[in-house]
Image (cartoon, rainbow, N blue to C red):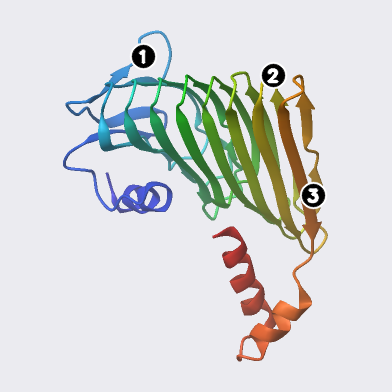
Amino acid sequence: MDNLDLYMLGKIADLKEIPSAGAYNIRKNGEGVERHSSENIEIIPKTDKPGIDIKIKPGTKAEKVHIPVIITKEGVNDKVYNDFYIGEGADVEIVAGCGIHNSGCETSEHDGIHRFFIGKNARVKYVEKHYGEGEGTGKRILNPETEVYMEENSYCEMEMVQIKGVDSTIRETTAKLGKGAKYVVLEKLMTHGDQTATSNMEIILNGEDASAQIISRSVAKDGSVQVFKPTATGNARCKAHVQCDSIIMDSAKISSVPAIVANNADAQIVHEAAIGRINNDQLLKLMTFGMNEQEAENIIIEGFLA
């Protein structure tokens, strides 16, 4: 791993070096380069297609798994299939993410298909960061697909962040909740230039007393385009709340199309959506502290996406 590799790992997974212990799998330019299992977390390469199986033993507590992907060459087209099996009563954190540094003229792309099978009473926190950079003209494309299957009284919290520099992304998320399961998603996204971003979510609450909270915060600058389409479907007594808040700037375009479906009289499902410009009063207040307009905008955006 060279300095660029470590820099990219820091951006997407807060890693300053290769971990000396714990479970991790590091993928670079379409190949696995570093892998380590722990006593309670086993990482097994798939034999039929690119990707890994991550098996977390029942009852595992306070452990973390890192599975970052970095691409530092042009012309790489990488697709992986990762399956997570979280045992009953486990409580773990999974840190993923993909960073692309493209200094060439050919497109580099990473498509990650992740499936989560979360056992009874298990708790999972999943953090996924996407980042792109490089002085080349080649595109940086990221298309994640996420499937979540939650058993009784399980909990899953997902933080999905696109920092900057991704030219195109199509994000597909599906979750199916059993009895008493709770699913929380915070999606944070920023686009600029002529970038495009589409996020489709389908949350299906099948079990009694299942609940979901979906929060999307996004900022669109320049001529970028964003589309957010979340759907929450209640098939039993359940609760769900979908909230989409966006800041639009310059000549950007944003579409927020939330949908809610109740197939049970005791399903309580709510959605909210708001798109607007940066508040002028906030700008003026910050500028009275000596900031110029650009600096004030940056502070507001950072706070909004924090």
Image quadrant assignment for residue 160: top right
Which quadrant holds the C terminus?
Answer: bottom right
- Structural crowding at the residue carrying mark 2, measured as other residues with C-alpha within 10 Å and reported as few (<14), some (14–19) or many (≥20): some
Q: Name the residue type under label 2.
A: Asn
Is 125 placed above or below 261 here? below
For image coordinates 68% across by 40% down, the residue present is 241
Residues under labels 1 and 2: Cα distance?
Answer: 35 Å
The local secondary structure at tag 1 comes to: loop
- Badge number at residue 254: 3
Residue lying farthest top?
Answer: 48
Q: Position of residue 19 (x, y in %)?
A: 22, 43
Q: Position of residue 56 (x, y in %)?
A: 30, 23
Please name the residue that numbered disc 2 is placed on.
235
For marks 3 and 1 on the same chain, the one whose residue lies earlier in the sequence: 1
Residues under labels 2 and 3: Cα distance?
Answer: 30 Å
Q: Position of residue 59 (x, y in %)?
A: 26, 25
Q: Is residue 135 left or right of residue 238?
A: left
Q: Is residue 235 visible?
A: yes
Residue lying farthest front?
Answer: 266
Count of picture labels: 3
Please name the residue that numbered disc 1 is placed on.
46
- Structural crowding at the residue carrying mark 3, measured as other residues with C-alpha within 10 Å and reported as few (<14), some (14–19) or many (≥20): many
For marks 2 and 3 on the same chain, the one whose residue lies earlier in the sequence: 2
Q: Is residue 255 left or right of residue 106?
A: right
For marks 1 and 2 on the same chain, the one whose residue lies earlier in the sequence: 1
Which quadrant holds the N terminus?
Answer: top left
The local secondary structure at tag 3 comes to: strand
